[in-house]
Image (spheres, rainbow, N blue to C red):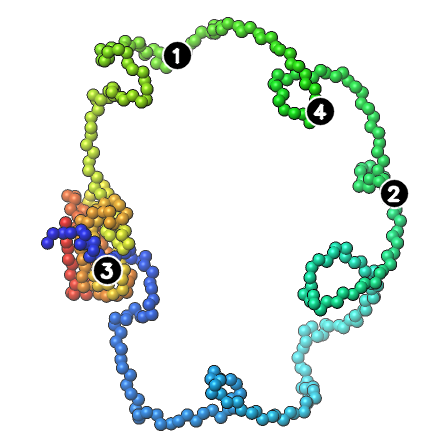
Amino acid sequence: MAFDPQTARAHFEGREITLYGTQKPQFDGLTTNKQDYVKHPFEGREGGPRTTQWAGNTAKFDGDTTYHSDFQKMQLPERAHAPPSQYHPTPAAFEGNSTYGEFYKAHPIERSSPRQAGPYQPNSVPFDGTTSYGQAFVPHTLPERQYAPGNAYQPPSAAFDGTTTYKDNYIPHDFEARPQHGQHAPSHVSLPFDGSTTYGDNFKPQPILPRQEAGRNPYQPSSAKFEGTSESMDKFRAWALDTSNRRGGPPPPMRPSLAFDGTTTNREMFKGWQLPARRPALGIQMHGDVAYVLIPGNAPVPAVGRQVFTTVHHNQTEISLLVLEGDFSQASRCNVLGHLQMVGMPAGPAGAAKIEIIYHVDEKGVLSVTAMDLNTQRQEQWLKEGYMAAHLS
């Protein structure tokens, strides 16, 4: 039967693998040994059905049940009220000690002198809010209060050599005029003034006198000798142009839009080198269309790559190994070299199996694939009951 990559990819559904340790355990309400659990029926009790009846509780029930419709209220008898008893101190002697009882001294508390209440100062800020009891609030008129006259201001006797905030008491002093020095005529600016001053009404435009242009001096080369060397001055030679390759007439002007019909300078010396074929990476397909690389591309041979994988579904007894060739991270874009199938694996929860897959490429470039369960008991059980099926391209 010919190998079909599409059939192998379709067979991969339901038999996927993933990296071991990356799958989170999920609890679905069952134990991990649900396949080994055997239900046992309950046996009947000895002596047949129970014949005793429930006698009920003799204590009175004075609460409420959840069955209000079936509950019947019972009249409670009145209790006789006992006369209140008087307090009688305990006759037992106090044989203990209080905290620092021997060192405690009672000190009399002196009464504080009563304070005289000052005159009420109302708040000048108007109240524009509402109280929580707006409907029940009754406004009361406040009686007028007599304000006491203020004391006369007494200025301080200390000398003040600064400035105060009391402008009414400030006395201005005349400034003495400074001696006038010789005034310099303002220098004219060569730039034209096209703005406006802050005193636009008082500004008077002044005519600008034309300037006389000075004659330019003739260029005088430098008389200093050049003692240096220019780039490749000693090796520079003038070469004559070869006009034999011209196609009649002068060459056309250099324009980027014209097609290039010349030759490169290294065309005769250019040689094409054949690059060696690159060996693509070798990997395996995982759940979610992911390609996991075991041997990178162009790795030196012999090369070995190994990784531990696990199952994706609960009670998964088969896994499908798709050997991929390609440098893409998506498994669907890589080539399928072969299809290996492990059949008859012991069932278990998802993520419990530890399947190690080993790729080995020898000196001749031959690929060998090995798969084994790291659990010894599961490996022995699979060797007895299961088998490996291989389909190569």
| Crowdedness near tag 2: few (<14), some (14–19) or many (≥20) residues, C-alpha within 10 Å | few
Q: Nearer the viewer, mark 3 or mark 1?
A: 3
Q: Name the residue: 76% across, 16% down.
A: 182
Classify 99 as above or below 186. below
Q: 372 or 189, which is in the foreground?
A: 189
Q: Nearer the viewer, mark 2 or mark 4?
A: 4
Q: Position of residue 31 (x, y in %)?
A: 31, 70
Residue 369 in view, yes or no = no
Q: Which residue is mark 4?
A: 201
Tag 3 secondary structure: loop
How many callouts does the rendering have?
Answer: 4
Left or right of residue 223: residue 92: right
Q: Amino acid at mark 4?
A: Asp
Q: Which residue is mark 2?
A: 157
In primary-sequence order, the first of circles 3 and 1 is 3
Real-space Cα separation, disc 1 to disc 2, in angstroms: 90 Å
In primary-sequence order, the first of circles 1 and 2 is 2
Q: Name the residue: 87% across, 59% down.
A: 146
| Crowdedness near tag 3: few (<14), some (14–19) or many (≥20) residues, C-alpha within 10 Å | some
Disc marking residue 229: 1
Tag 4 secondary structure: helix
In primary-sequence order, the first of circles 3 and 2 is 3
Q: Which residue is mark 3?
A: 14
